[in-house]
Image (spheres, rainbow, N blue to C red):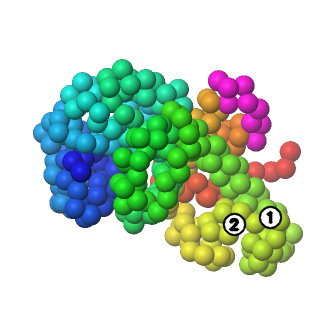
Amino acid sequence: MNIAFIGLGNMGGPMAVNLVKEGHDVLGFDLMSQNADKAKAAGVAIAANAEEAVANADIVITMLPNGKIVLSVFDQLLGRAQKGTVFVDCSTIDVASARKAHEMAQKANMLSLDAPVSGGVGGAAGGTLTFMVGGSDLAFEKTKPLFDIMGQKAVHCGADGSGQSAKICNNMLLGISMIGAAEAFNLADALGLDKSALFDVVSTSSGSCWSVNTYCPVPGVGPQSPADNGYLPGFDAALMLKDLKLSQDAAGQSGAATPLGEHATKLYDAFVEKNGVGHDFSGIINELKTQSRS
């Protein structure tokens, strides 16, 4: 296929490279020249501008920072592509913007999907991402071969916006569960309980969860995780905060009660404000350890 790839940063760049490795013609564009140069060095052809990238594309993939930028890019490019082109937005954005992007694509006689990903930079490079996809069956079937290259799983979650809905629900739960895991290990420490013993119990009993079994926030316990690398990010706490805020925006708009999601957002907001970017979200265990019981 002819693929336009708009946004060649830490996630988009490796995804585009994997498509090239499988023989697809990828014409990429990124406003940041260093991102474009890095992708070019790995084999991605670079367009002079975004309009040139999409002109002959069968599928346009976007990986962008937020909903406002996604809508601006859609507005810029929908009229420049061939009718029937599939626009696939892999950014993580608010549900309302995702649905608006679908509306814009429909009016321009284009197919569209919202397809945020899980798996981080490592998953993008390794082609092991999970795609959560919203949109029509036709658009999904046309794009599925590309999802199979860039990831290990693509779940068609339903109609327009369903991919973003699934992503923020999943990551809200992840943020809550990581805080729970951190609290459990901090309590174990205060009680003089060996952390490895707690891991052996939790990972095989009712407290079992990904935040413990796969991504334990304690160094030297369980499989290798960012905790074993000074909490350098596999998934930056700032990105977790972004997703939690999106979940709370959606909860407010839909009227859903998410008290734990709301509290997790406040805790990560304080963590990121204090530490900035460059810290894995599991590092919140150290922040919680400094707090006294009220």
Label 2 residue SS: helix
Say if residue 259 shows up in the picture: yes
Of residues 109 and 122, which is closer to you in this image? 109
Q: Main secondary structure of the magenta part?
A: helix
Query: Would residue 6 be found to the left or right of residue 128 on screen?
Result: left
Q: Percent from the top left, x then y, of residue 240?
A: 57, 47
Tag 2 residue: 212
Q: Would you place residue 109 above or below residue 19 in this image?
A: above
Q: Percent from the top left, x then y, of residue 224?
A: 56, 74
Q: Percent from the top left, x then y, of residue 225?
A: 56, 69
Of residues 63 and 132, which is closer to you in this image? 132
Badge 1: residue crowd in 10 Å (few <14, some 14–19, many ≥20): some
Query: Would residue 80 be found to the left or right of residue 184 on screen?
Result: left
Most distant residue in the top direction: 107
Q: Percent from the top left, x then y, of residue 50?
A: 21, 35
Residue 274, numbered circle = none
Q: Is 257 a magenta residue?
A: yes
Q: What stretch is highlighted in magenta?
A: 251-260
Q: Would you place residue 282 above or below residue 229 in this image?
A: above
Q: In the rendered structure, which disc, 2 or 1, sits on the residue that comes first in sequence?
A: 1
Query: Would residue 101 be found to the left or right of residue 58 on screen?
Result: right
Tag 1 residue: 207
